Image (cartoon, grey):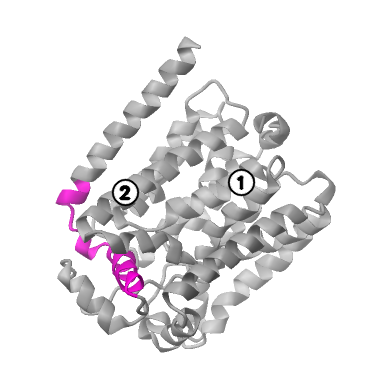
Amino acid sequence: MIRKIAQIVFVICLFAVSATILVFVADTMDFGNRDYIGFWAAGKRLVNHTSPYDSAAILQIERGAGYTGDWSNVSLDLPAAFFLVLPLGLVSAKTGMALWLIAFILCLMESVRLLWKLHGRPNNRLHLLCLLFAPVFVCMMAGQLGAFLLLGLVLFLYFHQSRPFLAGAGLLLCTVKPHLFLPYGIVLLAWALHRKSYRLLAGIAVAIAASCVLAFFFDPHAWSEYSSMMRHNPGIQQDFVPTLSVLFRFLIDRNAIWLEYLPAGAASIWALWYFWSRRSLWNWLDQGMLVLLISELCAPHAWFTDEMMLLPAILAALYAARGSRWTLLLYCAMSAVALIEFFAGAKLISPYYLWTAPAWFAWYLFATRSKTNVTEFSLSGAES
């Protein structure tokens, strides 16, 4: 009892210190030129029942908050993300940044805690190495959505057996960027149908329906505006996003957007076969992690910050390789190189980040190469 109380006090103190630091960072950082400013401007437009995809109006709001770019930082996320950005429209840009960072660290801490419990509460501190995962830090500095994607994924992993409706509802967070989860989502649907987990599907459906109602209330034309914005945004075709799918398109025909979806399509077919051939023994903390890595590797449009969603696979590999010093050192070295690139000034649009997703995938295979230790962990015992 005393030990548990001490742990609770420690977590509260850790959060208090982290929140204080984040508020200080928000007060001193150039938040006007972070990705966050696009979410805040979208929130400002939504609370006034106006379009968050109007680039001219968004640019005017962003410049009022200190943005110095030539092009508006319009959020390319689906209207499903409205519930995340709406609260930002009620506060100033500086206050919103502090709240955004606090929400980020809360999502991160809860995700790591649930993953630690899923793996049977091992008596070590390997889960703290998740905080050294380079995309986590860069995602926080950019003010991006990665922590919310991560939490949605972890809620599914943690509750898909014990509370499937809640697990499905949690996946709403992943629908903010569904293109990152195409093979994973197809396998999830096949798994739910095979296991007759209709409550999980109901949770997804209800959460998406509620999100659409919210979007319709604040902007009845949100979906048509989003479609128009995606068709007429010059950056969609011209900007190089450091992913293998975009590289594939640029090497063949940079104007043929559909080429970006070929790798994800091929990966989806493979993932469906991979699941079906192992359906009777399927474990989301084992085979599911490989599908997650493939989904990110073949995503048609992804940034380095989006790789934060790979944290469940990273932690599973860390536990699988906990006896291998070289594997842990390699993980730390890879994260260090990525952070050095970031602090050296490499912009997220730089091709220097092309190596990261393949590197995490290769490292995961290396870390789990001997015996699939991940399958030794029982989900039923962890969720009790």
Whether residue 177 can be seen here: no
Judge from the rendering whether residue 110 lies leftward or rightward of residue 194; answer left or right: left
The residue identified by callout 2 is 101
Residue type indicated by callout 1: Leu
The percent position of residue 293, horizontal first and vertical second, equals 58, 54
Determine the residue positioned at 38% across, 85% down: 233
- Above-or-below relation of 25 to 201: above
Determine the residue positioned at 22% across, 64% down: 33
The percent position of residue 318, horizontal first and vertical second, equals 54, 35
Q: Nearer the viewer, residue 176 or 305?
A: 176
Residue type indicated by callout 2: Leu
The percent position of residue 338, horizontal first and vertical second, equals 36, 51
- Above-or-below relation of 43 to 11: below
User: Going by the picture, which residue comes out furthest to the top?
Assistant: 2
Q: Secondary structure at mark 2?
A: helix
Q: Nearer the viewer, residue 339 or 117?
A: 117
Judge from the rendering whether residue 283 lies leftward or rightward of residue 96; answer left or right: right
Q: Nearer the viewer, residue 1 or 152?
A: 1
Judge from the rendering whether residue 376 lies leftward or rightward of residue 90; answer left or right: right
The percent position of residue 294, horizontal first and vertical second, equals 61, 58
Using a 10 Å C-alpha cutoff, classify the residue at mark 2 as few (fewer than 14 neighbours), some (14 to 19) or many (20 or more): many
Determine the residue positioned at 68% across, 43% down: 163
Most common secondary structure along the magenta stretch:
helix
What label sits on residue 365 in the rendered view? 1
Q: Quadrant of residue 347?
A: bottom left
Using a 10 Å C-alpha cutoff, classify the residue at mark 1 as few (fewer than 14 neighbours), some (14 to 19) or many (20 or more): few
Segment tinted magenta in the rendering: 25-48
Residue 30 among magenta residues: yes
Residue 237 among magenta residues: no
- Above-or-below relation of 306 to 236: above
Q: Quadrant of the C terminus?
A: top right
Contact flag, marks 1 and 2 (Cβ < 8 Å): no
